[in-house]
Image (cartoon, rainbow, N blue to C red):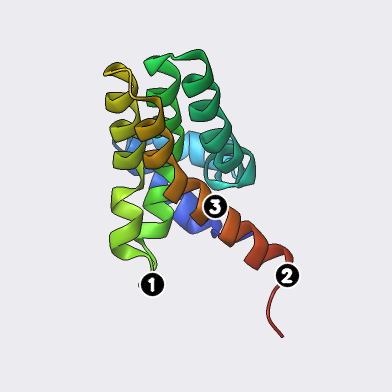
Amino acid sequence: MILSKRYLEYFLLGLLGGGVLGAALATIFPDVAPLVFGWPVILLSVLVPMIGIFRRSVIWVVAGAILALPFAIYLGGSPRFRLVGLFLPLLHLAAAFALERKKLRLAWFFLLPYVALVTWLAWSVINPSR
């Protein structure tokens, strides 16, 4: 597991404003981090905006931006991807804006860097360099 349980406790406490409720949830759900920061959500953050562009629905693309937030926050914590991680959800929102203006190619263009980064990262995880 990439994230420690201590980090998960701090995350849940910060998300819920601390207190007894946050501490209780951090204790009850110690394995939430892979669901929030893991590959299922990363893949959904790629597929949901694609479906949105195909259906010409801005809501789906904005939902993809919301799904991309945990991954962007996680990448923002890395020195290599610090600036890139902060701008990833903005690419989704730019795609939603282009879709609102009926510019499908521009929407795909804005979504392409995110898809390329996720594809590259997945390839790096599957085939680590020796």
Name the amino acid type tagged 1: Arg
Q: Nearer the viewer, residue 16 or 35?
A: 35
* Above/below status of 6 relative to 97: below
Name the amino acid type tagged 2: Asn
Circle 1: element type: loop
Q: Nearer the viewer, residue 21 or 117?
A: 117
Residue 89: quadrant of the picture: top left
Of mark 3 and mark 2, the one earlier in the sequence is: 3
Q: CA distance from mark 3 to mark 2?
A: 14 Å
Circle 2: element type: loop
Q: What is the count of numbered marks?
A: 3
Q: Residue furthest bottom?
A: 130
Q: Is residue 27 left or right of residue 106?
A: right
In front: mark 3 or mark 1?
3
Of mark 3 and mark 1, the one earlier in the sequence is: 1
Q: CA distance from mark 3 to mark 1?
A: 15 Å
Q: Are marks 3 and 2 in contact (CB under 8 Å)?
A: no
Of mark 2 and mark 1, the one earlier in the sequence is: 1
Residue 127, labelled with which disc? 2
Report whether residue 104 is seen. yes
Q: Is residue 101 left or right of residue 72?
A: left
Report whether residue 12 is seen. no
Residue 44 picture location, percent across and down: 58, 33
The residue that appears at 69% across and 74% down in the rendered structure is 128
Q: Residues within 10 Å of mark 1 (few under 14, many from 20)?
A: few
**Quadrant in which the N terminus is drawn:** bottom right
Residue 37 picture location, percent across and down: 53, 46
Residue 106: quadrant of the picture: top left
Residue 118, labelled with which disc? 3
The residue that appears at 26% across and 19% down in the rendered structure is 101
